[in-house]
Amino acid sequence: MFLVRSAAEIMEKNAAVLDAGVLFSEFMKPAASGLRHVVVTKEGRPFGVIRVNADLRRAIGTVAQSVTLGELCQRDFIIVRESEAMYEVISGMSKEQAVAAVVMANETGKGPAVVRGIITKDYIADAVAGSIDIYAG
């Protein structure tokens, strides 16, 4: 069942974790062309999220030289742990009207927070659709 699977099972693991001060133009070097999501950090903590798509690349265009990831990121996200069930993630995103959930490592000790991945509404929809079995009537 999808709703009881953990955030770690569902999350997108291929997300860049970059500082808010990084210029968008630096991020968009060829190595980043396949990335779909960025978790933006400030002082080692999640600060925002960015969904990288063709529309964003076109909209930024020539001003990319001076725009930082911190200026571009969306701040409406929640933080969840790897072990949280998807029903908790979805409930939290709905309650906070969040566009994404940043998945953090379960460790609660001292030291820097470790980002493990990201879950977006689009990714939830894809995972739900993929988990449905269609039965012939």
Image (tube, rainbow, N blue to C red):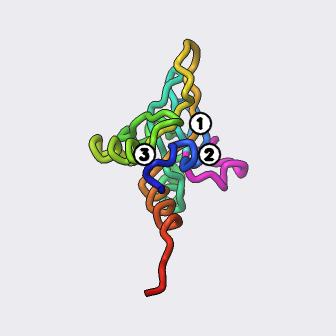
If you read the primary sequence from the N terminus, does the residue marked by circle 1 or circle 3 appear first? 3
Residue visible at 48% across and 68% down?
Answer: 132
Residue visible at 61% across and 41% down?
Answer: 16
Q: Which residues are magenta?
A: 24-37
Label 2 sits on residue: 13
Q: Residue furthest left?
A: 95
If you read the primary sequence from the N terminus, does the residue marked by circle 2 or circle 1 appear first? 2
Residue visible at 58% across and 14% down?
Answer: 111
Mark 3 residue crowding within 10 angstroms, few (<14) / some (14–19) / many (20+): many
Tag 1: residue type? Arg
Label 3 sits on residue: 100
Q: CA distance from mark 1 to mark 3?
A: 14 Å
Secondary-structure class at tag 3: strand
Label 1 sits on residue: 116
Residue visible at 71% across and 52% down?
Answer: 30
Q: CA distance from mark 2 to mark 1?
A: 7 Å
Q: Residue furthest top?
A: 110
Tag 2: residue type? Lys
Residue 68 in view here: no
Q: How many marks?
A: 3
Q: Nearer the viewer, residue 60 or 92?
A: 92
Query: Is 108 contained in the magenta span?
Result: no
Quarter holding residue 112: top right
Mark 1 residue crowding within 10 angstroms, few (<14) / some (14–19) / many (20+): many
Mark 2 residue crowding within 10 angstroms, few (<14) / some (14–19) / many (20+): some
Query: Is 32 contained in the magenta span?
Result: yes
Tag 3: residue type? Ala
